[in-house]
Amino acid sequence: MWQKAQEDLAGHGFTVVAVALDTADAARPWIEVAKPSYPTLIDRDHHLAALYGMINVPEAVWIDEGGRIVRPTENAGAFDGFRRRDVVTGLMPPEVVETTARAKRIYMEAVADWGRNGAASRHALEPASVREKLRNSNDEAALAQAHFRLATWFLAKGEQARAAPHVAEARRLHPDSWTIFRQTYGRNDQGFATGDEFRERVAALGERRYYPKVDIEGMP
C-alpha cells in the first residue's frame, strides 16, 4: 500500500521513508522482495523510536516539506483483528477481516489527501494539536533505550550472556514498548514474535487496544 501511495503522490512532492526497527538479517529479505521505489532503512538500534516515541509497528509520523511534524507518531492504519485469529486455523472472522481492511483503506485515504493538499488537508493538524498529541519521553524510556542499544551491541558480538541483563532491564523500564519486546523475544521462521509469551502479553491488555485507534474520521 505504501508503494502505491508513493507512485500516486510522487508528483505532489510526497515521499515515503520506511524504517525497519529490526536487524538487517531479519529485515533485508522482506525489503528485497518488496523492491520499494522509496527509501527504506534499517534502524537496528531504534534511534527513530527514541526520537519520535515509537512503541510499535506499523507506526507513522507525517512530516511536511519544512521539516515540521504534521501528525505525530500514530498507528499507521493497523487494527487489532489478529487478536480474533483462530490459533489452529490462522483464520479471522469475515467481519474482522473487513474491519481490518477498512482501517487500512481509511488511513491511506487520509495520507493521500494530505499528500495532494498539504496544509489544506483536513487531516493536517495545527501545531497546538501536534504538541498535545506528542508522546513525551521520560527518564525511564530513555534509560530503556540505552540498555536496549547496549544489549544489541553485545548480541552483535555474540555475547548473549552479557546482553541478557540489559534486555531484561530495557523491558522492565519501558513495558509499553512492543518494539523492544519483539526484538528481545524469540521469533518464528518468518521473523515474527509469536508464541505463548507474546499471546499472554497481548491478552493482558484486556480491553486496551494493541493498535490504538487513530483520530481520523471513520477509523474503527
Image (spheres, rainbow, N blue to C red):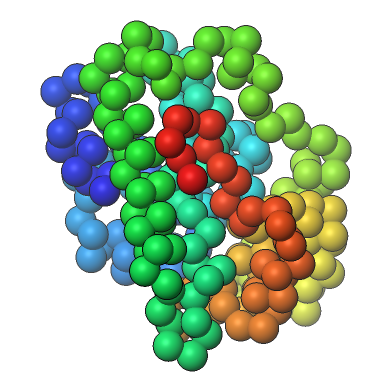
Q: In this view, does 132 lie to the left or right of 9?
A: right
Residue 119: x, y in percent?
37, 10
Q: In which quarter of the image is residue 37?
A: top left
Residue 200: x, y in percent?
72, 75
Pick the residue in front: 54 or 79: 79
**Which residue shows up at 33% across the image and 22% down it?**
114
Reply above or below: 9 against 70.
below
Instruction: Let me know if residue 14 appears in the view.
Output: yes
Q: Is residue 136 left or right of residue 19?
A: right
**Which residue shows up at 77% across the image and 41% down it?**
142
Residue 69: x, y in percent?
50, 20
- Residue furthest to the front in view is 95
**Which residue shows up at 53% across the image and 10% down it?**
126
Reply above or below: 184 against 9.
below
**Which residue shows up at 61% across the image and 66% down it?**
182
Q: Is residue 47 left or right of residue 5?
A: right
Reply above or below: 62 against 121.
below
